[in-house]
Image (cartoon, rainbow, N blue to C red):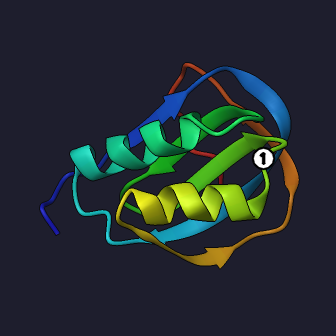
Amino acid sequence: MCGCQSTTATGEAESTGRGYTVTGMTCQPCAAKVTRAVEQIEGVTGVSVDLAAGRLTVAGTATDEHIRGAVTGAGYQIATTWPRQAVVIGARHRPVS
């Protein structure tokens, strides 16, 4: 791991979302690549990547298959998926736990 400890958040959404463990992210550019890939999916209203925890949180109505496809297409793998829950992703760059 490169030592980068970062959280990236985009959008400002209060919605239902899912959490994912993403493997292979080792630095801020990795987190940014995953964020950009997932932001492109129709139905995504917010994205948060916690690089230190290897966690991706996605708000909106996008399907797991679309999210998994975007992450895989960016060169990473989803190891775990958490159930839908209420999430808030905003401009404060706070990860959702």
Q: Position of residue 81 (x, y in %)?
A: 70, 72
Query: Would residue 85 be seen by someone viewing this image from the given angle?
Result: yes
- In this view, the residue in front, 75 or 31, is 75
Q: Position of residue 64 (x, y in %)?
A: 74, 62
Number of numbered callouts drawn = 1
Please tell me whether residue 64 is drawn above or below residue 43 in the rendered image: below
Which residue is pictured at 48% across the width and 68% down the height? 22
Query: Would residue 54 be seen by someone viewing this image from the given angle?
Result: no
Classify residue 54 as left or right of residue 65: left
Which residue is pictured at 34% across the width and 40% down the height? 32
Q: The C terminus appears in which quarter of the rendering?
A: bottom right
Q: The N terminus appears in which quarter of the rendering?
A: bottom left
Report the residue that reaches farthest toward the left.
Answer: 2
Among the 4 quarters of the image, the one containing residue 65:
bottom right
- In this view, the residue in front, 41 or 93, is 41
Residue, disc 1: 62
Among the 4 quarters of the image, the one containing residue 60:
top right
- In this view, the residue in front, 37 or 28, is 37
Q: Position of residue 92 (x, y in %)?
A: 54, 22
Dot 1, how many residues are within 10 Å of its Cα: few (below 14), some (14-19), or many (20+)? some
Classify residue 15 as left or right of residue 26: right
Classify residue 68 as left or right of residue 60: left
Q: Amino acid at mark 1?
A: Ala
Q: Secondary structure at mark 1?
A: loop
